[in-house]
Image (cartoon, rainbow, N blue to C red):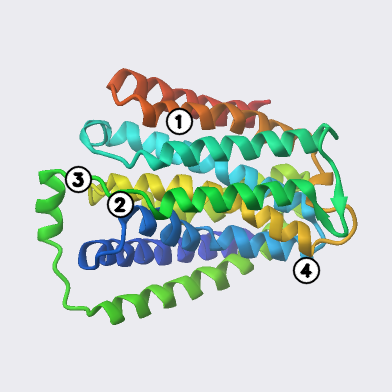
Amino acid sequence: MIYLEYLAAAAIVVILSIKASNYIDLLDKNTKLSGAFLGGIMLSAVTSLPELFTSISATVLLDRPGLCMGNILGSDLFNLLAISVIILIYFKGFSKGRVSKSYRNVAFLVFLIYIFIGLNFMNVVNVRILNLSITSVLILLVYVLGAKYLAVANDVDTDEDALDYHASMSTKLSIKQIGFRFFLASVGIIAFSIIITYLTDQISVKLNLGQGLAGALFLGVATSLPELSSTITLFKMRNYNIAVGNIIGSNLFNFIILAIADVLSLGSGVYAYPDDKTMSLLLFGCIATPLFWIMLRFKNRTTQGLCSVGIICCYAAFLLV
């Protein structure tokens, strides 16, 4: 019964996320807001709401900070896996599409955060001031810089196919109605994300799973379903710019969740529970993120294909190691 409840809650999150991505796309086409801002900040923040509330629930309500770390690192690696698979499926269209250069800078900042966390795990940079780790402070500073890159990014030109596609997607909704429906979808995502946290904890206890593995699989994958579903929807819409911004922006935003959970946690914080699976997530995240940067930097098909396959191999290696 618990597995059916988990699947039902996950399915509802997916449906609400598809709705949210549709409303973001309508705002992109009917307002003067930057596509990079909508995808990299607004949509990525909304699709990261499950990670936020599952992590807070795991840390504060359940007192299982290991679930939080597995959730965030697992979600980030799964996000890269998801977009890599989607890129291979929509390979021809993506290779011709244009993506904002700002996302390369954000990918580098995400990699930098991986380094900070790794140094904390190795006790190289492991200082706590009151109830806050210096790692969380560094993450906050990097996020502010990354958000600036996303907010001021110049929009890219849209190709003719995308223009034709969106021309056929007219809506009678006003901007206010779109915004209100987007808000309702966001509230629904939050509510069912909290439900998923409790179900995951019960499943992990029942299956006797470690917190890192349980967090990565049952929380990390489940909370990444919004990014997955919204990215698929945006690729179908040929809106590759917002799709990429959604993923890399979500990965950056997820690390802010770690900092928030660290502040709210009691004791030694969320960085003090690196089991073997958590270390594997960190290692393969450090490999997959630079591959994603290379994919964005070099637009030839061979490089993009090889990098996509490399990221997929990273996730497979995490499952096997």
Earlier sequence position, callout 3 versus callout 1: 3
The three-letter code of the residue at mark 2 reads: Leu
Report crowding for label 4: few under 14, some 14 to 19, many 20 or more residues within 10 A (C-alpha): few
User: Mark 3 — residue?
Assistant: 157
**What is the number of the mark on residue 234?**
2
- Inter-mark Cα distance, 2 to 1: 20 Å
Give how far across and how far down residue 243 sits, in percent.
35, 48
In the structure shown, which secondary structural element does the residue marked by tag 4 occupy?
Answer: helix
The three-letter code of the residue at mark 1 reads: Trp
Taking the spot 58% from the left edge, 65% from the top edge, the residue there is 193
Earlier sequence position, callout 2 versus callout 4: 4
In the structure shown, which secondary structural element does the residue marked by tag 3 occupy?
Answer: loop
From this view, report whether residue 258 is shown above or below residue 76. Answer: below
In the structure shown, which secondary structural element does the residue marked by tag 2 occupy?
Answer: helix
The three-letter code of the residue at mark 4 reads: Leu
Earlier sequence position, callout 2 versus callout 3: 3
Discs 2/1, front: 1
Earlier sequence position, callout 2 versus callout 1: 2
Work out whether residue 156 or residue 18 is closer to the camera in this orientation and state it.
Answer: 156
User: Mark 1 — residue?
Assistant: 293
Give how far across and how far down residue 320 sits, in percent.
64, 27
User: Mark 4 — residue?
Assistant: 61
Mark count: 4
Q: Looking at this view, name the residue that lies furthest to the right.
A: 267
Earlier sequence position, callout 3 versus callout 4: 4
Report crowding for label 3: few under 14, some 14 to 19, many 20 or more residues within 10 A (C-alpha): few
- Inter-mark Cα distance, 3 to 1: 21 Å
Disc 3 and disc 1 in contact, CB within 8 angstroms: no
The three-letter code of the residue at mark 3 reads: Asp
Give how far across and how far down residue 56 sits, in percent.
70, 64
